[in-house]
Amino acid sequence: MTNHNRVRIFDRQAKSYEKRRKKMQLAGERSKLLRYATGKVLEVSVGAGNNFLFYPKGVHVTAVDFSPKMIEKAKEAAAECGIDCELFVSDVESLEFPENTFDTIVSTLSLCAYQRPDEVLRKMKAWVKIGGNILLFEHGISTNRTYSWFQNRLDGLSVKLFGCHQNRDIVQMVKDAGIVIEHLERMMLNSVLLIRGTVESKV
């Protein structure tokens, strides 16, 4: 799938993401994870700004998404929530920041969509300061055999309709990137994950 087609798929979903924000869907999970955000925060694939309400006071958020329509909705959310936020349109996979730029990096429900999620995780490791937080709220392949069978069968359709893979092994990818998992919670037949990770070394 071309990058243009991927952007078009997510542009088309911007209004539905906004509706989920206003309904405060997944508020408990977002709140539980984002209370660990501190200092300079990078949020990748910010979507419609569904996390903004749950950031602690005093953080400065740099937020990026490759979908212009999503960024439009995120700007509205930032204004409504009164969050200190800088937003811009960019493909995270081609984005560059100096090493050790951020105290916290946040990704919610985005590792399913990247063409090279392993590269994005390696970038997160480089961009966060040693001892900083990498906060992930993601979904991927379930440990339940029956459910994972359906995930594998439906993966192609999910990518075509929503730009979203169902069967990625998120935990293994995080470990392979050299990110240390300090806390892990599994939900929904072990297919949805809350991960609080950190970086102990840049080696």
Image (spheres, helix red, strand yellow):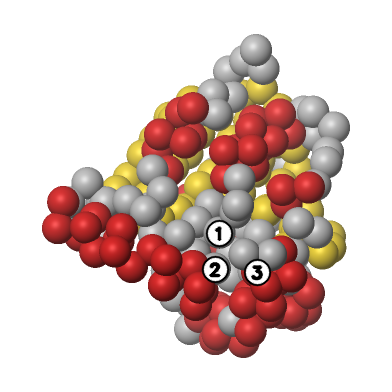
Res 110 visible: no
Q: Position of residue 153 (x, y in %)?
A: 29, 64
Q: How far apart, in angstroms, are the residues tagged by discs 3 and 1? A: 9 Å
Q: Position of residue 24 (x, y in %)?
A: 48, 77
Residue located at (69% from left, 65% from top): 2
- Residue 89 occupies quadrant: bottom right
Res 185 visible: yes
User: Vertical placement of 54 versus 180: above or below?
Assistant: below
Tell me the crowding category of disc 1: few under 14, some 14 to 19, or many 20 or more residues within 10 angstroms, Cα based.
some
Q: Which mark is residue 113?
A: 1
Relative placement, left or right, of 86 versus 7 is right
Q: Amino acid at mark 1?
A: Ala
Front position among marks 3 and 1: 3
Residue tagged by mark 2? 163
Pointers 2 and 1 in contact (CB under 8 A)? yes
The furthest residue to the left:
146
Residue tagged by mark 3? 6
Q: Position of residue 142 (x, y in %)?
A: 26, 51
Closer to the camera in the image, 142 or 149? 149
Quarter of the image for the C terminus: give it: top right
User: Vertical placement of 18 versus 195: above or below?
Assistant: below
Q: How far apart, in angstroms, are the residues tagged by discs 2 and 3? A: 6 Å
Q: Secondary structure at mark 3?
A: helix
The furthest residue to the front:
1
Pointers 2 and 3 in contact (CB under 8 A)? yes
Q: Amino acid at mark 2?
A: Gly
The furthest residue to the top:
203
Q: Earlier in the sequence, mark 2 or mark 3?
A: 3
Residue located at (55% from left, 85% from top): 16
Q: Earlier in the sequence, mark 2 or mark 1?
A: 1
Q: How far apart, in angstroms, are the residues tagged by discs 2 and 1? A: 6 Å
